[in-house]
Image: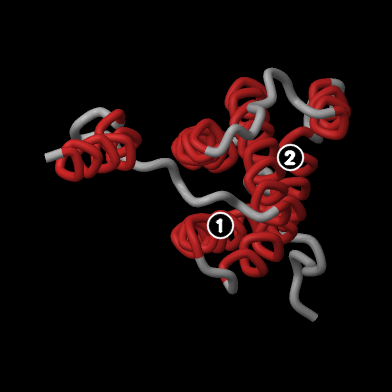
């Protein structure tokens, strides 16, 4: 009898931690490496900057393709940032409350861009930042785990943004078509004479 009582106490003590967990609760996520934590922090800061710059560009853009692109950046990077913030919270990674120094300087520079130059500067910056982001995400995608899965899921979107930015930049470089001028009625077009010899 005494042996049965001791066994029951031993079983109760050993199973107490398992019973203390709420029914249906999810076990904590596996811990992340320093590299994975750095990826989440960097990708989160970049995503927040893309959202903020996208909102600025929606107000400042001078052409409709740039406005549409800026709206897409704010929306797409907002969704990506939400997923990253969820990962950060689960793993105890601090979520920035404001843009980093580099992003604030870039924002200020774009805000001060003179009329007529904003679209080109914004799109050139977007092409460059997406090229950098693709390298960051490709390196992470080669790894396993939650951050590798996230990077692999995000890469098609980043490639799409990069190609769209490149296309808009090419359109802006071509510039608007020169205005068509017509000679007044009765005048011969330049390079021709009105009489035949």
Mark 1, Cα crowd under 10 Å, few <14 / some 14-19 / many 20+, is many
Q: CA distance from mark 1 to mark 2?
A: 16 Å
- Residue 51 in which image quadrant: top right
Name above or below for residue 91 compared with residue 186. Answer: above
Residue 22 horizontal side relative to residue 132, left or right: left
Residue 50 coordinates in the image, percent (x, y)? 64, 36
Residue at left 77%, top 46%?
125
Quarter holding the N terminus? Answer: top left
Secondary structure, mark 2, is helix
- Between discs 1 and 2, the one toward the N terminus: 2
| Location of residue 24 with respect to 32 vertically, above or below | above
Q: Are marks 1 and 2 in contact (CB under 8 Å)?
A: no
**What residue sits right under mark 2 in the picture?**
122
- Could you say which is closer to the camera, residue 153 or residue 67? 153
The answer to whether residue 183 of the structure is visible from this angle is: no
Q: Nearer the viewer, residue 111 or 190?
A: 111
Judge from the rendering whether residue 9 lies leftward or rightward of residue 43; answer left or right: left
The type of colouring in the image is secondary structure
- Which residue: 56% across, 49% down? 31
Given this view, does label 1 or label 2 mark the residue nearer the observer? 1
Q: Is residue 60 visible?
A: yes
Residue at 49% x, 64% y: name it. 152
Q: Kindly identify the residue that appears in the image at 64 percent across and 27 percent down.
A: 95
**Residue extending furthest toward the front:** 2
Name the spot of residue 196 as percent of width and height, x first. 75, 76
Find residue 158 and name its label: 1
Q: Left or right of 80: which side holds 132?
A: right
């Amino acid at each position: 009898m005494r042996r049965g009582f001791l066994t029951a106490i031993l079983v109760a003590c050993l199973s107490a931690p398992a019973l203390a967990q709420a029914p249906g609760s999810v076990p904590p996520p596996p811990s992340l490496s320093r590299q994975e934590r750095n990826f989440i922090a960097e990708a989160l800061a970049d995503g927040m900057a893309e959202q903020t710059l996208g909102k600025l560009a929606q107000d400042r853009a001078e052409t409709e393709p740039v406005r549409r692109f800026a709206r897409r950046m704010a929306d797409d990077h907002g969704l990506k940032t939400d997923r990253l913030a969820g990962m950060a919270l689960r793993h105890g990674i601090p979520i920035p409350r404001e843009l980093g120094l580099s992003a604030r300087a870039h924002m200020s520079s774009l805000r001060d861009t003179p009329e007529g130059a904003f679209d080109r500067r914004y799109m050139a910056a977007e092409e460059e930042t997406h090229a950098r982001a693709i390298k960051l995400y490709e390196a992470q995608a080669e790894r396993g785990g939650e951050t590798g899965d996230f990077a692999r899921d995000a890469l098609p979107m980043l490639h799409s943004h990069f190609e769209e930015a490149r296309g808009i930049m090419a359109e802006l470089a071509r510039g608007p078509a020169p205005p068509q001028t017509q000679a007044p009625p009765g005048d011969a077009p330049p390079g021709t004479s009105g009489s035949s010899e």
